[in-house]
Image (spheres, grey):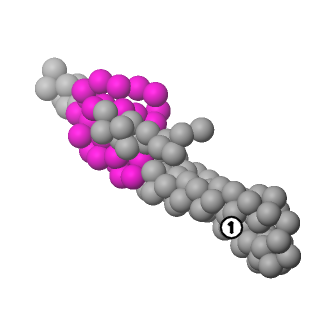
Amino acid sequence: MGDNFQLEAAAKRRNYRFNGGGGDDDEGEEEECCDVEAWEILSKGFKEVQTVLNHNRLLIQQVNENHQSKIPDNLAKNVDLIKEINGNISKVVGLYSNLSTNFSSIIRQRQVIASAVGKNISEENDSNKALEGVES
């Protein structure tokens, strides 16, 4: 797994949509802005997770080196290193929990926006039909 989840590249691609669509509809710019903001939030979270995982990788390497050295002081240091690794794992769980919450919130917001836009379009169509009936 690479260090870069390439979310930034996806966020910069024109017309990228969470809903899997694309195109140049009237709300395109607003929708693209929301998508970029969403990707930035998620990208920041993934970067935080990756930073902690990278730090754990270094700690694990140090634990292995200490273990292989069989020097009593180095073995004693492993206790604290392993505690730090465990703490970092808890931190990663929390970060992923936050990512999940953020992602769910973004999806809910998108559904509310889509519902409101759909309702406005429906009301506009009803108004236009009523006006057409009056003009006839």
- Please indicate whether residue 51 sits to the left or right of residue 85 in the image: left
Q: Position of residue 36 (x, y in %)?
A: 34, 46
Q: Position of residue 84 (x, y in %)?
A: 72, 73
Q: Identify the residue at image location x=47%, y=43%.
A: 4
Residue 117 visible, this angle? no
Residue 6 visible, this angle? yes
Q: In terms of image quadrants, where is residue 74?
A: bottom right
Q: Return the residue nearer the eye: 21 or 45.
A: 45
Q: Return the residue nearer the eye: 5 or 117.
A: 5
- What residue is disc 1 on? 88
Q: Return the residue nearer the eye: 110 or 84.
A: 84
Q: Return the residue nearer the eye: 34 or 96.
A: 96
Q: Position of residue 124 (x, y in %)?
A: 28, 37
Q: Position of residue 132 (x, y in %)?
A: 20, 25
Q: Is residue 21 magenta?
A: yes
Quadrant containing the C terminus is top left
Q: Identify the residue at image location x=35%, y=25%.
A: 22
- Please indicate whether residue 19 sits to the left or right of residue 126 in the image: right
Quadrant containing the N terminus is top right
| Residue numbers of the magenta segment | 14-40
- Please indicate whether residue 88 sits to the left or right of residue 37 in the image: right
Q: In terms of image quadrants, where is residue 63?
A: bottom right
Kindly identify the amino acid type of the residue bearing the numbered disc 1: Asn
Q: Is residue 101 magenta?
A: no
- Please indicate whether residue 52 sits to the left or right of residue 10 in the image: right
Q: In terms of image quadrants, where is residue 121?
A: top left
**Of helix, strand and loop, which one carries label 1?**
helix
Residue 69 versus residue 8 in the image, above or below: below
